[in-house]
């Protein structure tokens, strides 16, 4: 990928990478940082990435960066809010409200109640339309395991909506 | 915790997931699923809810990656390579200069010969090791950068001088 192709790839995929990171991390600022870092890393590795693979490469990189951030948060227990308990509190945060409006507040709340792994599965598959093979590669799991995990994630998302007293 | 379901319901729900995936690798008996859904209101509700979860996720518009963040990406990538190249050239020339100086030192101080008031054998060995190290670094950098002029200096002047030093 040359500089011109890199520029096109960034313009084509920046919003997707940003959306993925924001919804996975549930934090627009951290999501922006992750998206930025993924886009910069693509430039560093551009000679090894063909334009057609840029989207998958960026989402895979963003996913790994998000996992790093989530691990750091795990070391600071107060950083990861239990969202279903905090929806009311979050209504006061314009940045999160904006993200919630984009995805649909109820689905956003349900997603937020899931584990990062389940969120990744649903975001990659349903929001970003990633094929199974790419997902298996991104999440480093066998294809069969991935499909079973995706089914469970969908079911948990549905249950989360029901538990919150709402129908999807 | 979801209530236990019958085997027929479990089969139908697995089929529903496969149908959501539209995965050709997963065989789905559509007629069997439809027959079960007709007879089972619970599974019918699950089917509707899963479909609505998927629809809501797929309908989510992407968030807009902030313009300021994009500018920072350009600053760190497409607007930065010139600086990087200059730095790399400086690093290469610095390496060459160091190799030249150390090479000259090596040539001036023959191996194994007692030198009154000069460096010890240990110092000479250390200098030789440093020269080789700098040479390897410089060599790698120049081959990586692919600059012919620099490579000619390295191959035509520095390498023969080092070889001559080793022979002595």
Image: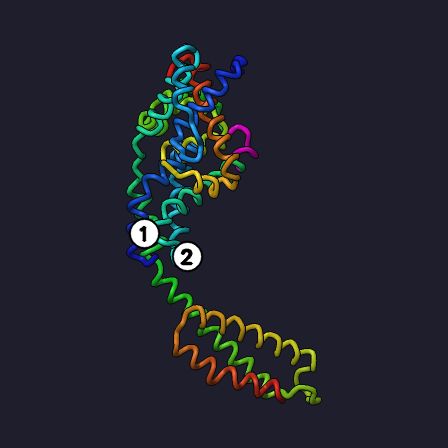
Q: Give the SS element for disc 1.
A: helix
Residue A59 placement: quadrant: top left
Please give the chain letter of the residue carrying mark 1: B
Whole-angstrom CA distance, mark 1 to mark 2, is 20 Å
- Residue count near mark 1 (Cα–Cα under 10 Å), binned few <14, some 14–19, many ≥20: some
Task: Tell me the residue that label 1 is attached to.
Answer: B74
- Give, as a single range, the part of the protein colored magenta: A72-79
Discs 1/2, front: 2
Q: Is residue A12 above or below residue B13?
A: below
Q: Is residue A24 above or below residue A109?
A: below
Q: Is residue B95 above or below residue B69?
A: below
- Does residue A160 show up magenta in the picture? no
Residue A61, can we see it? yes
Pointers 1 and 2 in contact (CB under 8 A)? no
- Residue count near mark 2 (Cα–Cα under 10 Å), binned few <14, some 14–19, many ≥20: few
Task: Tell me the residue that label 2 is attached to.
Answer: A48
Q: Is residue A56 above or below residue A80?
A: below
Residue A78, percent from left and from top: 52, 28
Residue B151, percent from left and from top: 43, 78
Q: How many marks?
A: 2
Residue B100, percent from left and from top: 51, 81
Say which of B13 and A115 sits in front.
B13
Say which of B9 and A105 sits in front.
B9
Left or right, B14 with reference to B117:
left
Please give the chain letter of the residue carrying mark 2: A
Write the residue at 38% across / 56% down.
A46
Residue A157, percent from left and from top: 44, 23
Say which of B134 and B38 sits in front.
B38
Left or right, A137 with reference to B82:
right
């Amino acid at each position: 990928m040359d500089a011109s192709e890199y520029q096109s790839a960034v313009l084509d995929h920046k919003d997707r990478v940003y959306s993925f990171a924001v919804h996975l991390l549930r934090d627009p600022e951290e999501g922006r940082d992750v998206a930025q870092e993924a886009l910069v890393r693509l430039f560093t590795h551009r000679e090894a990435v063909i334009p057609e693979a840029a989207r998958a490469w960026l989402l895979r990189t963003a996913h790994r960066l998000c996992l790093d951030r989530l691990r750091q948060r795990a070391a600071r227990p107060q950083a990861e809010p239990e969202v279903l308990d905090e929806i009311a509190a979050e209504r006061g945060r314009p940045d999160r409200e904006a993200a919630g409006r984009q995805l649909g507040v109820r689905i956003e709340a349900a997603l937020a109640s899931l584990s990062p792994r389940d969120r990744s599965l649903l975001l990659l598959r349903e929001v970003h339309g990633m094929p199974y093979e790419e997902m298996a590669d991104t999440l480093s799991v066998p294809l069969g395991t991935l499909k079973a995990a995706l089914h469970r994630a969908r079911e948990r998302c549905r249950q989360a909506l029901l538990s919150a007293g709402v129908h999807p | 915790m979801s209530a236990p379901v019958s085997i027929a319901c479990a089969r139908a729900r697995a089929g529903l997931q496969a149908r959501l995936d539209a995965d050709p690798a997963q065989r789905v008996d559509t007629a069997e699923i439809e027959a079960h859904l007709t007879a089972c209101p619970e599974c019918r509700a699950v089917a509707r809810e899963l479909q609505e979860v998927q629809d809501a996720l797929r309908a989510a518009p992407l968030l807009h990656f902030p313009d300021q963040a994009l500018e920072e990406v350009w600053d760190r990538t497409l607007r930065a390579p010139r600086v990087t190249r200059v730095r790399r050239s400086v690093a290469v020339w610095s390496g060459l200069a160091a190799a030249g100086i150390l090479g000259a030192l090596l040539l001036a101080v023959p191996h194994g010969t007692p030198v009154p008031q000069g460096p010890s054998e240990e110092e000479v060995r250390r200098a030789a090791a440093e020269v080789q190290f700098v040479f390897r670094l410089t060599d790698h950098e120049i081959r990586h950068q692919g600059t012919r002029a620099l490579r000619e200096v390295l191959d035509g002047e520095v390498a023969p001088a080092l070889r001559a030093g080793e022979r002595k």
